[in-house]
Amino acid sequence: MACEAPIGVFDSGVGGLSVLGEIRRQLPQESLLYVADSGHVPYGEKSREYILARCRAVAAFLLEQQAKALVIACNTATVAAIAELREQYPLLPIVGLEPAIKPAAALTRCGVIGVLATTGTLASARYALLRDQFAGNAHVIAQACPGLVECVERGELHSASTRALLKRYVQPLLEGGCDTVVLGCTHYPFLRELLAELLPPEVQLTDSGAAVARQLERRLVAGELCARGPARPARFWSSGDPAALKPLLPLLWGEAAEVTALAR
Ligand code: DGL
């Protein structure tokens, strides 16, 4: 496999752009492909079988584009599909992401951690395992956030309705006295500014984006797959309306780019 081949990254929509940004920061020599499965967003309220079928379709597409590694930039898709994708492609480096409970357990001083994630992530056996393994003695307050992903998909990072919804979701965390909040969905890091307004300053936020980029680098090094660069410009596809994603790229990715329709 050519080291200069790209890395394929995908999410149910624009959330994975928060992870793509970390990959670009840490691995600037790598060429990146990104699929927003926006025709099927949100994953968080859909069945495991549905998400698995979508992940298989998107992974097959990225491999047709010669991806040398895959990043499932979505907590919900990781818990639903990473085991099956690794079984299907045993030689391919596949990196997924899970709510950052372990770092949160190390950060909390009061021993109470809040987790914001999708309904699907919180209902999964993988999440329960993660919490039981890594939360240690901390008390975990988990809050599902239906509707929040759609706010980010619309690019509404500061609107009154996004603020009202987020306020409702952080309320139980505040009442429970948490001092650390896990952003357990890749859409939520785009709401950090709003969260900073809604949470007391001593509350710390954690997400998994940077850790995923580090893990990806380890996998590339182990497989002798690191690119020398220079990277080619990132390429974007959407299974939804490409015209809806295109204006969001400067906001969420920091650069304008063309978006191609993904018809599958
Ligand atoms: N961004 C995704 C995650 O990390 C999923 C959002 C969704 O489609 O519900 O969980």
Image (cartoon, rainbow, N blue to C red):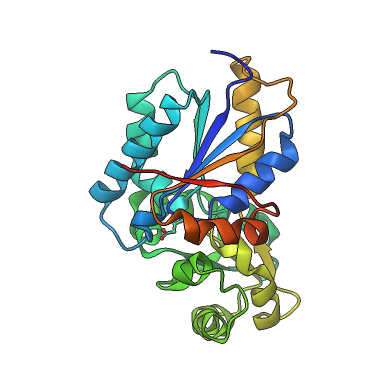
Q: Is residue 241 above or below residue 113?
A: above
Task: Tell me: 150 left or right of 207.
Answer: left
Q: Is residue 178 above or below residue 37?
A: below
For the point 70% across and 29% down, the residue is 231
In terms of image quadrants, where is residue 61? top left
Task: Tell me: 46 left or right of 122.
Answer: left
In terms of image quadrants, where is residue 228? top right
For the point 60% across and 73% down, the residue is 157
Residue 139 in picture, x, y percent from top left: 53, 67
For the point 39% across and 28% down, the residue is 86
Task: Tell me: 52 left or right of 41.
Answer: left
Quadrant containing ligand 1: bottom left
The residue closer to the viewer here, 69 or 258, is 258
Task: Tell me: 95 left or right of 85.
Answer: right
- In this view of the protein, can residue 131 be seen by the observer? yes
Residue 214 in picture, x, y percent from top left: 67, 36
Residue 138 in picture, x, y percent from top left: 56, 63
For the image shown, how many numbered marks are present on the structure? 0
- In this view of the protein, can residue 111 be seen by the observer? no
The quadrant the C terminus occupies is top left
The residue closer to the viewer here, 100 or 216, is 216
Residue 148 in picture, x, y percent from top left: 47, 71
For the point 35% across and 59% down, the residue is 120
The residue closer to the viewer here, 262 or 221, is 262
